[in-house]
Image: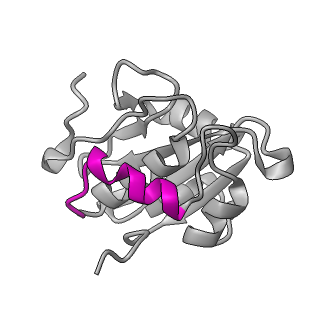
Amino acid sequence: MNPKLWNNIRFCKQRDQFSCGPVALLNADKFFGLKVTYRHLITYSLMLECTPKHGTLTSSMSKIIGRASRRSWENTEKFLQGCTGCLIIQTGDGRAGRKGHFSLICRDRHGDYFLVNHFDRQYAAMPLKADLIRRYWKEAYRVWYLNKVTYNWS
């Protein structure tokens, strides 16, 4: 599967061991139509105070996109319908606000689910069946529901 998805979105993949938070925000903005590329990653990293030593703190992510929340799976499915929203999930152990990995979950207009920048480094986005997406969502330590661009570039 090519990482190029519906509407010609070409998501970015993480190229190091610590920038999953900035990559997740950048890909969310790409999902919502912003013309951002991997070149903008430094701006996202600065915005989230992401460092090679600590990566992205949960508190930094929450400061930019708001408090994480949890909805029922049925409401999450409805939220993801029609390409109007996406999720940033934090997997792993989020205690102390330092551990875990940030990924993006989205759905295209055909109803197919995609996991973006998870642990597979071969592709930026992987199409997955609903039951696998649900498992990742359920096992996530935190979930942020986004229905707009995360950062105002103007």
- Spot the residue most to the left: 8
Rendered location of residue 68, percent (x, y): 67, 63
Residue 66 colored magenta? no
Using the rendered image of the protein, determine whether residue 77 is visible from the camera's viewpoint. Answer: no
In the image, residue 19 above or below residue 68: above
Q: Is residue 63 visible?
A: yes
- Majority secondary structure of magenta residues: helix
Q: Position of residue 96 (x, y in %)?
A: 86, 49
Whether residue 145 sits left or right of residue 25 in the image: it is right
Q: Which residues are magenta?
A: 34-47
**Residue at the extreme bottom of the image, as rendered:** 154
Return the residue nearer the eye: 123 or 136. 123
Q: Position of residue 83 (x, y in %)?
A: 31, 59
Q: Nearer the viewer, residue 130 or 62?
A: 62
Q: Residue at x 76, y 45 (%)?
A: 98
Q: Position of residue 114 (x, y in %)?
A: 38, 38
Quadrant in the picture for the C terminus: bottom left
Q: Residue at x 54, y 57 (%)?
A: 76
| Above or below, 50 relative to 52 | below
Q: Is residue 99 above or below residue 22?
A: above
Quadrant of the snapshot with the N terminus? top left
Quadrant of residue 70 in the image?
bottom right
Residue 42 among magenta residues: yes
Could you say which quadrant of the image residue 115 lies in? top left
Q: Is residue 127 left or right of residue 33?
A: right
Q: Is residue 32 above or below residue 107?
A: below
What's the residue at 29%, 41% (across, down)? Answer: 11
